[in-house]
Amino acid sequence: MLRTDNPTSDPVPLQEPVERDLFTSEDLRKRLFADRSARYFVTLGGWAIIFSILAILFVIVAEFIPLFKSPSIVLEGTISASGESPPLGVGLDEYREVAYLVDASGIHFYSLAKYEPLPSSSLPELAGAQIVSVSSSESNFLALGLSDGRALPVQVAFENKYSADLTRTVLPRLVPEPPVALRQDGQPVEHIYHLEKEKGYSLATTVGSGRVAVVRVEKRKNLMGGVTRKTSRDSFSLPIKGKISAMVFHGVENAVFVGTTSGQILRADLDHLSDPSAIQVIGKTNKPEIGVAAMNFLLGDYTLIMADSTGGIGSYQWLRQEGEKTRLQKIYDLDAHPAAAHLFASSLRNKGFITGGGEAVKVHYGTTGETQLTVPHPSGASFAALALSPKADAILAADANGKMFHWTLENPYPQITFKSVFEKIWYEGYERPEYVWQSTGGSDAFESKFSLVPLIYGTLKGTFYAMLFAVPLAILGAFYTSQFMYWRLKGIVKPAIELMAALPSVVLGFFAALLIAPEVERFLPGIILMPVVIAAIVLAALLIYELSGALKSRIKLGREISLLVPLTFLAGVLSFYLGQGIESQWLMGDHRTWLKEVFDVTYDQRNALVVGLAMGFAVIPIIFTITEDSLSNVPEHLKASSMALGATPWQTAIRVILPTASPGIFSAVMIGFGRAVGETMIVLMATGNTPIMEWSVFNGFRALSANIAVELPEAPEGGTLFRMLFLAAFLLFVMTFFVNTLAEIVRLKLRKRYQGL
């Protein structure tokens, strides 16, 4: 082959092309190695992500699972008491190293480490009398009823001593008070009841079938360091049927509650005994022939536990509403004993208590009304005395033969059950069962309320109002941007909206709390009118645009936004002025007063409306971007085919492009929903964080995520609140997982349905 492009030179033969392989074997090996490395790296990364998520889930589950662990009890040992008379009472110290037993001769101590007797302290105050009855408390303050009509108050004290190697030794001792003549006739005090106070104590006993004697001792320290005692005495008769069978002091008010063999429950106001209304019948058992066997208050002196003569255990709340008589409201019927449960001990830490009747001890919890454990007597005998340790981690019981049993009780979260977390509970002081979250209180007697329902409700409420605001704006905006907007304007609008996603949640929350919330409260009527006014003005402008040829010639297709934006702004300003006029003329001059008077709705400045607006701004960029991409990525041949068949751009967009992009649009909505469910800072800052259950847009709420952020720093590690917050986190995980799974299922079905287009 000769070159002929240069006519003045001799022809030069062309070189034949050299044939060579495009890829050598070395190149192929490198490419295969890179391909395999990338595949393994991507696979490893995917599994690492899955493993990390599962590890986080495992940690969350491991933290809250102990909440629902069933309580357990283990028999640690037994002690055979040396006394000849049946036991009247038992008790133990907070470290469970020393136990004591009360019988007719006195108080005897025993080691719970070696299960053997300890040297016992004598009570010279007995003066030859015998102990015939005992009233005890979890603080180990005893009231001993004596055979000569006296009462002997005794504090069982435990002194802790530490050796050089920090070994603890508990030394018991008795601190008796001066005896009190409780019965004037010198007859044995067969039944005694007491109430320990900060500056004294009160004692009571029955005198005859319907008469009660009460002695109150008030102690005061004088300037010399001594103690003076002031004693007052009262006695009164009760209009009862049968005999007095149980009695308990009410610590909140100076009163006693009395139960009878005929099933009556009476209350006597000790400060107004001269008043005929001071003694009232406030309750009764289920049937007149069923008597009251025992009664006592739980921690806080609000819930009364009553055991009847058939073995039934009932929980009552003491109610005293303004303008009404005092009454008892029955709350729960707990698991019954086979015989009358005359033994009772309550916890100093919560609403737990134990009852003993016949051959078994039962562990209950007052708030939930559940019986959590039943502990039978190891040999089938009957229990005669019962005590719960000060830390509620042990039970000490004695039978009629003087044999004591020491159990370890493991029940760290008695108030947490499926019922207390997800069902209505009748809490103390409430008129009916309700869902309540209230983890802290102002007193030791406060019962924590851990219902997650208000938090789930608040999460869904905030998400609902945010999506109600964000979804229409985001989808319609994406629809217009992708199908009708001029391409140069689209290059400005879409990036601007996507930049909104870069705004930190804390900034949006701060902006909502300090600016949006006050302005929404100020212009609420105008804000409610705004959608109507904007829609009316925009529709009118579009009608004029369609009818006016001159306007059409000036504003080309795809640039209508240049007209709509100013009109929308002017319509918003007009809405504010119209709202102020309507408020002054028809809303009593103040929309908050009008809402309260007409609809009984309280307006909170930080409410669901504010959260919906602020969180809507956080969700709009996500939904807009994914929706716009889904609409823009519909194959062009579908649009061209529709237009070729004579369809208008609007018909093509609605009937072809929108159905084809529907899987992506649905995914966008679900992803936005998941974003709103997990939002923390906006919900935390823009609402009042009150866990109430009202759908009103003018009330606040508390979401699961905000609750975790607020309470986790104050929650003791391993405590009930700490683990409940992990349960809330698990519920958030489940909610988002469910939403994402549902979104994927629906997306695949929609994709399968429209993939043939």
Image: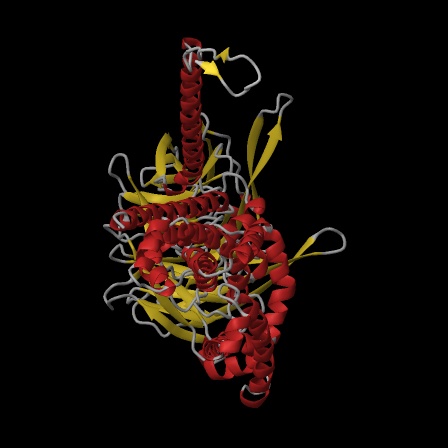
Q: Is residue 685 left or right of residue 311?
A: right
Residue 55: name its quadrant: top left
Q: Is residue 536 above or below residue 227?
A: below
Q: Position of residue 530 (x, y in %)?
A: 52, 75
Q: Position of residue 259 (x, y in %)?
A: 36, 64
Q: Position of residue 664 (x, y in %)?
A: 38, 50
Q: Position of residue 371 (x, y in %)?
A: 32, 49
Q: Nearer the viewer, residue 201 or 389?
A: 389
Q: Is residue 158 above or below residue 27?
A: below
Residue 267: name its quadrant: bottom left
Q: Is residue 254 left or right of residue 654?
A: right
The residue depicted at 23 percent of the width and 50 percent of the height is 338
Q: Nearer the viewer, residue 468 or 294?
A: 468
Quadrant containing the N terminus is top left
Q: Is residue 419 above or below residue 461?
A: above
The residue depicted at 37 percent of the width and 42 percent of the height is 68
**Furthest residue in direction front, as rendered:** 8
Q: How many marks?
A: 0
